[in-house]
Amino acid sequence: MKCSPLSRYLAELTGTLILVLMGCGSAVLAGSDIGLVGVSLTFGLTLLLLAYAIGPISGCHVNPAVTLCLFFDKKIEASEVPGYIISQLIGGVIGAWILYLIASGMPGFDISKGFALNGFGEHSPHHFSMISCLITEIAMTSLLLFVVLATTKPYFSGGFGGITVGLTLAAIHLVSIPVTNTSVNLARSFGPAVFHGGWALQQLWLFAIAQFIAVIVALGLHKVICQGKN
């Protein structure tokens, strides 16, 4: 039985909230203790758990790029797209707000010096150029979307989608945290940027463009590579 639109939107809001709180929270609150590997695993494991918790309700997109990709792949209706994306963006903001409330109680916390923000140039963790960051986000988001598309096909082993996508997200973070702090998800970038303001909001355009391009790349790759698969 298909869940109501309201249930699906609430599931997406809650899922994105949890992803931002746990993933970004691991960097902001525990980054010095768990390091890059720990933050990467937190993002991946959180998505893995969410896939089984809310996947049966909404499909566990928790990412506007995933929603767009599945729409173009005819997995969801056009009428559902705005509700999904708005819910994800709101969830990202609420997750960042909860994280901000927690982090504000930490001695020496300064949102301008560390809030898991995505950026390029001087705001890249290792000061990668704008072009490097753009290419990284396109490549990594394309990989994530390609794997998501594969897990929705009948030939993919049932029950393993959440594990596959979660581990993919963890691997992506291991590679791209030093470059952009890893977005591959506009809602994840948007939430923390709202509370920081300034450059974080001003640089969101790069991540939006990269992820839209990635939707096109992933759909094209999947069509060519998986042609004829049932």
Image (cartoon, rainbow, N blue to C red):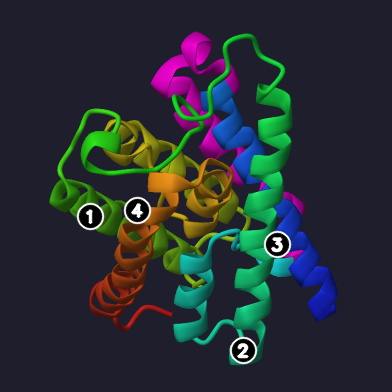
Mark in front: 1 vs 4:
4
Q: Is residue 202 left or right of residue 135?
A: right
Q: Residues within 10 Å of mark 3 (few under 14, many from 20)?
A: many
Q: Position of residue 113 (x, y in %)?
A: 44, 24
Give the residue at x 32% y 69%: 218
Secondary structure mostly seen in magenta is: helix
Q: Which residue is mark 4?
A: 203
Label 2 vs 4, first from the N-terminus? 2
Question: Magenta stretch: residue 43 in it?
Answer: yes
Q: CA separation, marks 3 and 1?
A: 26 Å
Mark 1: secondary structure? helix
Label 1 vs 2, first from the N-terminus? 2
Q: Which residue is mark 1?
A: 134
Vertical placement of residue 30 versus 139, above or below: above
Residue 170 visible in this rendered orientation of the protein:
yes
Mark in front: 3 vs 1:
1
Q: Magenta segment range?
A: 29-57
Q: Nearer the viewer, residue 91 or 157?
A: 91
Picture disc at residue 12 = 3
Q: Quadrant of residue 205?
A: bottom left
Picture disc at residue 77 = 2
Q: Residues within 10 Å of mark 4 (few under 14, many from 20)?
A: some
Label 4 vs 3, first from the N-terminus? 3
Q: Residues within 10 Å of mark 1 (few under 14, many from 20)?
A: some
Question: Magenta stretch: residue 63 in it?
Answer: no
